[in-house]
Image (cartoon, grey):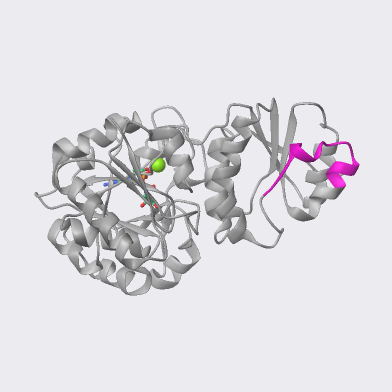
């Protein structure tokens, strides 16, 4: 398959042509990768079981891992799911935006899309090109992240090309995604609203809205044999760089002190801007110090993480070290992604 790549620009008329062409591909059962505010998505018509099946094939994705359906507006959810007051509350507070809501599904969504589950995940992206594409397609768009299964989610069109060139009909290049981590997922078709995947919409914000929100164990902990996460996708080893990644649990000082003792040829550190000079002075090659942004700028850490994990693979490092993020706010999302990338390999360091 030849993949067409089209770049969005400041020219609205041109963009409209690109999005109309993409919408036509979606309507006729093809695959289009498109930007959202979180990560790039790999889209197909959510009403077409055969088209959805192509998504699994292109990504190499296990067929029991359901897809999120993307809508142009929050009120469209009632066509595909049994919406509740809790949904209306979430929609009012966070839609369009980086939030996915799981509810009981209606018959019109094929089993291929939901991996055979009786629930469906719904999201209204805030990226204007994504919303316009859905509008023009006239159907909900089923879209997982547009990476090969097991790779970090793509935050640029170049990442999508790296993984899916020749496997999809079209890639829409809308530049780097702002948030850089996938949407927050909350499940409503259960006793208490339950957070399945943390993201830019935080557990604290959701708790403010509902009073109480449960946290699925798979968000922070490795499940033991036989345990199942509520989001099937959370059981797969995601984002794992090819070099082993060790997370250091301790203060910033403990972390720096610990990694300085590890410096060597293939050893790389994922750190903050403020740490760079000290690590270099302690013997690290500048190219072995990868930075996520300023220490206090968690938004930048989120935006940088996935691109940085891809860089680690390109550079053939032998060992990677990073600090374990805090389990609060947006940082909980970083914690969740990086602890999976590390295969739960955490070392606790305390200064003597
Ligand atoms: O930000 C995002 O959510 C991006 C963009 C493209 O919208 N999409 C995304 O999709 O991250 P994906 O497929 O990579 O992750 C979706 C997660 C998976 O872990 C999947 O198992 C879970 O959502 N999921 C989808 N439908 C579900 C359902 N009905 N019940 C439980 N989990 C579900
Ligand atoms: Mg994904």
- Residue at the spot 30% in from the left edge and 46% down from the top edge: 143
Whether 282 is among the magenta residues is yes
Looking at the figure, which quarter contains the C terminus?
top right
In depth, the one of 35 and 326 nearer the eye is 35
Q: Residue 305 location, x and y as percent?
A: 58, 47
- The picture quadrant where one finds residue 95 is bottom left
Q: Identify which residue is drawn at 14% across, 39% down.
A: 49
Q: Range of the magenta residues?
A: 278-291
Q: Is residue 338 left or right of residue 103?
A: right
Q: How many marks?
A: 0
Front residue of 40 and 322: 40
- Asked if residue 352 can be seen in this view, the reply is no
Of residue 178 and residue 22, the one placed in the foreground of this image is 22
Task: Please provide percent x and percent y for residue 3.
Answer: 32, 37
Q: Quadrant of residue 101?
A: bottom left
Residue 131 part of the magenta-drawn span: no
Quadrant containing the N terminus in the rendered view: top left
């Amino acid at each position: 398959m030849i993949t067409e790549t089209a770049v969005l620009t400041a020219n609205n008329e041109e963009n409209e042509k690109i999005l109309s062409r993409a919408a036509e591909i979606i309507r006729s059962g093809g695959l289009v990768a498109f930007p959202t505010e979180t990560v790039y998505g790999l889209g197909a018509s959510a009403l077409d079981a055969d088209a959805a099946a192509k998504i699994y094939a292109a990504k190499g994705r296990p067929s029991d891992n359901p897809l999120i359906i993307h809508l142009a507006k929050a009120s469209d959810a009632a066509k595909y799911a049994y919406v509740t007051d809790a949904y209306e509350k979430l929609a009012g507070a966070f839609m369009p935006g980086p939030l996915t809501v799981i509810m009981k599904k209606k018959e019109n969504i094929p089993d291929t899309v939901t991996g055979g589950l009786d629930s469906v995940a719904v999201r209204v992206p805030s990226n204007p090109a994504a919303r316009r594409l859905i509008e023009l397609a006239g159907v909900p768009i089923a879209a997982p992240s547009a990476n090969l299964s097991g790779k970090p989610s793509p935050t640029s069109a170049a990442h999508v090309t790296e993984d899916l060139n020749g496997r999809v009909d079209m890639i829409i290049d809308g530049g780097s995604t702002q948030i850089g981590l996938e949407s927050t997922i909350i499940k409503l078709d259960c006793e208490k609203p339950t957070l399945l995947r943390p993201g830019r919409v935080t557990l604290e914000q959701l708790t403010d809205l509902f009073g109480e929100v449960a946290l699925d164990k798979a968000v922070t902990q490795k499940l033991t044999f036989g345990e199942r996460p509520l989001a099937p996708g959370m059981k797969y080893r995601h984002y794992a760089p090819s070099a082993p990644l060790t997370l250091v649990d301790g203060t910033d000082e403990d972390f720096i002190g610990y990694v300085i003792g590890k410096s060597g040829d293939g050893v790389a550190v994922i750190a903050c801007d403020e740490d760079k000079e000290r690590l270099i002075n302690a013997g690290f090659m500048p190219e072995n110090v990868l930075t996520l942004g300023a220490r206090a700028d968690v938004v930048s850490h989120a935006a940088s993480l996935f691109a940085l994990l891809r860089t680690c693979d390109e550079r053939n490092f032998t060992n990677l070290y990073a600090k374990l993020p805090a389990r609060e706010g947006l940082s909980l999302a970083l914690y969740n992604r990086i602890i999976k990338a590390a295969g739960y390999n955490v070392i606790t360091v305390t200064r003597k």
